[in-house]
Structure formats: C-alpha cells, structure tokens
C-alpha cells in the first residue's frame, strides 16, 4: 500500500531494493490482466482533494477503478495523501502489461517455430500422381 502525493517517480535502484523476483515468478500476468476491466469515467467534484493536476475536471478519463483493481492487485492501490480516496499505481499496471507482452512474444515464437516445422513436413510429403 502506498500514499500518492503527486510524484510518479519510483526508487528502484538495486541498492535500495530487496526480495527482487521476476514478475513471471510472482504472478500470472496474463490471468491478472484478464481480471481487470478498463473503463471510461468522469471524476466527481471533491473539494478536499485536488485531483485535477491542471486537467479539465469533467474530462472523460480512461483507466481502471481502484476499488476493482484492489481485489486483483492490492499492492497497486494506495491512497491520495492522508485521505481514504483510493488511487492507482499505473507504473505497476504498466509493468504487468509489459510482462503480458513478453509472455505473448514467447508464445508467438513457439507457434511460429511449430508452423515452420509443419510447413517443412508438408513440403516433404510425396505429391500424388496426376
């Protein structure tokens, strides 16, 4: 759980981190991604929190609802300042998405290899006489 204060940078220097594991060792990223539902939404007025960051408050936004993500990936959900308002660590979500892309690349390479072997097998088959 984290508290958001408006900075999107994250300390990730090896000297400042521990328990480092690849994401593939930690979670099934493809399954996790399948459980998330992208949405569009507008923010409600909230006089206690400046959520605009210079943006149009009523603009349609695209993303995820923190309450929903919390059920699937709780470590990617935090609070805004000292409030109970939930926010998302989109860097964490981007990392999950990156892992899904890597997993898909491995799967694609395997499928392409299998296709090439099948094509070689078919090419080597005797042709029927006309």
Image (cartoon, rainbow, N blue to C red):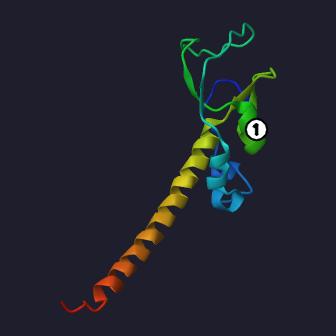
Tell me which residue sits at (70%, 56%) in the image: 27
Mark 1 surroundings within 10 Å by alpha-carbon count, few (fewer than 14), some (14 through 19), many (20 or more): some
Mark 1: which secondary structure? helix
Image spot of residue 28 (x, y percent): 67, 57
Occupied quadrant, residue 40: top right
61 sits left or right of 122 in the view: right
**In front here: 119 or 86?**
119
Residue projecting furthest to the front = 130
Q: Is 92 drawn above or below residue 124 in the view shown?
A: above
* Residue 41 coordinates in the image, percent (x, y): 61, 22
In this image, 3 relative to 105: left or right?
Answer: right
Exactly how many numbered labels are in the figure? 1
Q: Is 90 displayed left or right of 1 in the figure? A: left
In the image, farthest residue toward the top: 47
Q: Residue at x 44, y 68 (%)?
A: 109
Above or below, comparing residue 104 to residue 72 in the picture: below
Residue at 25%, 90% (x, y): give it: 128
For the C terminus, the image quarter is bottom left
* Spot occupied by residue 22 in the image (x, y as percentages of width and height): 64, 59
> Circle 1 is placed at which residue position?
70
Residue 123 quadrant = bottom left
Residue 39 at x, y percent in the picture: 60, 30
Which of 13 and 92 lies nearest the eye of the viewer?
92
**Position of the N terminus by quadrant:** top right
């Amino acid at each position: 759980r984290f508290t958001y204060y408006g900075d999107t940078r994250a300390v990730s220097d090896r000297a400042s981190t521990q328990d480092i594991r690849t994401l593939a060792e930690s979670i099934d990223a493809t399954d996790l991604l399948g459980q998330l539902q992208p949405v569009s939404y507008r923010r409600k007025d909230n006089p206690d929190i400046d959520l605009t960051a210079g943006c149009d408050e009523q603009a349609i936004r695209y993303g995820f609802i923190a309450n929903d993500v919390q059920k699937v990936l709780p470590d990617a959900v935090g609070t805004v300042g000292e409030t109970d308002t939930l926010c998302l660590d989109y860097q964490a979500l981007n990392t999950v998405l990156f892992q899904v892309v890597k997993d898909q690349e491995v799967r694609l390479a395997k499928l392409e290899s299998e296709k090439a072997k099948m094509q070689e097998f078919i090419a080597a088959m005797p042709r029927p006489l006309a």
